[in-house]
Amino acid sequence: MIKKLLAQNARQFEDVIRDFLTENNPLSAQLQEAMNYACLDGGKRFRPFLTKQVAKLFGGDENIALKAALAIEFIHCYSLVHDDLPAMDDDDLRRGKATVHKKYDEATAILTGDALQSLAFMLLSSPDLAVDAQGKLKLINALSNAAGHKGMVLGQMLDIAAEKADSLSLSEVENIQRFKTGALIACAAQFGAIIGQATEEQEQNICNWALLLGEAFQITDDLLDHFGNSQKMGKRLQKDDEKGKVTFVSLLGADGARQRLDDLKLSAEQSLATFGEKADILRQLWDWLIRREH
Ligand code: GRG
């Protein structure tokens, strides 16, 4: 059931992206085309799914949630475009397609990422988003925190620095992951809580749960990088091994990493317990993300 729901969500979200990007029609066809290329046709879209489901949990409007989630997806897509650049991870393949700098060129890829980042905040501050002024400020504040120098960008910087380090402890690896990938995933849940006008305590609970989900997601990604199928994943694998990178798998071993997934699930359940069965869809999302093969 979750697989079907996610597939439906991905299709619906693809339309939301396409409508929005077509509305914003800049003068450069190449920039517009590269932005479309970076955002459309691929991706699991689980962050918007998360925003929508959390909004629903708190009685928020699902369509507004999806529109706001576009901003998170734009930040996510920008991070992938920049992460693939030669100065970062230097990848040729993303979502089964040539990366943006391979399809176009490096300058276009840098500008595409920059433009997507601005677009995210343009969307959140736009009168077209049916959220009151205070709600919009909360969304903007949450996303700028999650994406910037206290969130994803910090995580990327720490990750780059870690490649040069002789050794890394488990808590250092956890920290990198928490900023690099966890912050944006938690922000997706926070968006749902803001749109559903959850209480501060509810918002905190759901963000805690999403941070644990972020860690479980990263451990799964590390396992897939080691054991996964490159064709199914649509990207180059075994990169961590090649670079001698310290990951959850290299530190804990595959069995240790799987054990940690079980432990995380138990902790996660505590954060969700107050929501009872209403949160079952989030539990299913968790299970799907850690069992995925792509
Ligand atoms: C370059 C500023 C900057 C940040 C990069 C998030 C990030 C930081 C880089 C992405 C590189 C990466 C592979 C990180 C691990 C997290 C991860 C698996 C991201 C991919 O997210 P998915 O699986 O991708 O949701 P899809 O394609 O499904 O949208």
Image: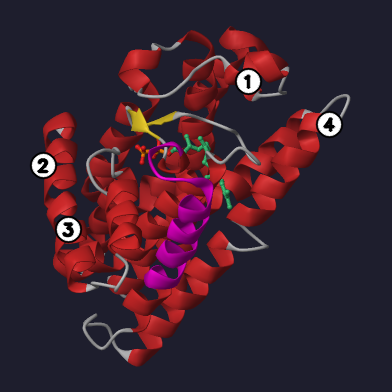
Name the residue beneath numbered marker 1: 240
**Residue 110 belongs to the span the image colors magenta:** yes
Which comes sooner in the sequence, label 1 or label 2? 2
Tell me the magenta residue range: 102-120
Left or right of 102, for residue 243: right
Name the residue beneath numbered marker 3: 18
Whether tag 3 and tag 1 are in contact, CB under 8 A, the answer is: no
Q: Quadrant of the N terminus?
A: top left
Amino acid beneath label 4:
Lys
Which image quarter: residue 122? bottom left
Name the residue beneath numbered marker 4: 164
Secondary element at image label 3: helix
Residue 81: % across, % down: 47, 46
Secondary element at image label 1: helix
Q: What residue appears at the point 66 percent right and 48 percent down from the top-left corner? A: 155
Considering depth in this image, is 102 or 6 the residue closer to the camera?
Answer: 102
Which comes sooner in the sequence, label 4 or label 3? 3
Residue 206: % across, % down: 42, 55
Secondary element at image label 4: helix
Q: Which mark is residue 8?
A: 2
Q: Quadrant of the C terminus?
A: top left
Which comes sooner in the sequence, label 4 or label 2? 2
- Count of numbered circles on the image: 4
Q: State the separation of the CA atoms marked 1 and 2.
A: 32 Å
Amino acid beneath label 2:
Gln
